[in-house]
Image (tube, helix red, strand yellow):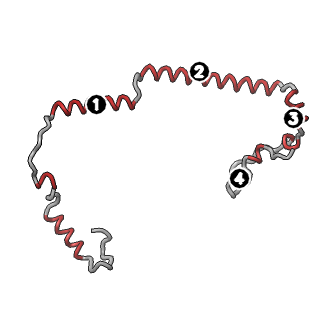
Amino acid sequence: MLELPPEKAANLGLGARQFRKREAPDMSNRSEWTDTPTDKQRKAQEPKTAEETDMDALKLIAIQKRDEEMEKLAETSAKRKPYSLLEMHQEKLKKQKKEKMKEEPVERRPFSRDIDLQCNKFDNAQKQSILKKASQLNNRFSQGESRFL
């Protein structure tokens, strides 16, 4: 008797502070709120109506059908894929690594400035444009025309 109905208790002070976008739940049956323990016990012992039992039976049948369909789907997908995608990917990487090791014999090569440091990445035109942008920065406190070099 001191507890709120379940529809009200779910949204007690925690919901959005705005108008409802959907219609409010049906609050016509408020007997749960005011029932005493003896009333609850009496209602639990009363036989359900024919409509309620039919609805419960239909729900159970629908759940069983869905479970059977999902079970069939799981069986067919298990037959198609003997391995998971992760296992397949790991196997592929192992094969590629083995092939790479067979193809390239490991040997040391001498140091080459151009290859190792890659100092000549851009040509003279790019160098000139970078120098031009850098010269537009008057001093270290001014922003300049462009934000980046």
Q: Pick whichever of labels 1 and 2 is earlier in the sequence.
A: 2
Please rate how many residues cluster around mark 2, counting C-alpha atoms within 10 Å: few if below 14, some from 14 to 19, many from 20: few
Q: Pick whichever of labels 3 and 1 is earlier in the sequence.
A: 3
What kind of residue is marked 1?
Lys
Q: Nearer the viewer, mark 1 or mark 4?
A: 1
For numbered disc 4, what is the local secondary structure?
loop
Rounded to the nearest angstrom, the CA distance separating label 1 from label 4 is 57 Å
Q: Pick whichever of labels 2 and 4 is earlier in the sequence.
A: 4
Rounded to the nearest angstrom, the CA distance separating label 2 from label 4 is 39 Å
Rounded to the nearest angstrom, the CA distance separating label 1 from label 2 is 39 Å
For numbered disc 3, what is the local secondary structure?
helix
User: Could you say which is closer to the camera, residue 108 or residue 127?
Assistant: 108
Q: Nearer the viewer, mark 4 or mark 3?
A: 3
Rounded to the nearest angstrom, the CA distance separating label 3 from label 2 is 36 Å
Rounded to the nearest angstrom, the CA distance separating label 4 from label 3 is 32 Å
Say which residue appears at 88% left-offset and 37% top-offset.
37
Residue topped by disc 2: 68
Q: Measuring from the top left, give residue 100's x and y in whole percent.
A: 20, 33
Q: Are marks 1 and 4 in contact (CB under 8 Å)?
A: no
Q: Quadrant of residue 106?
A: top left
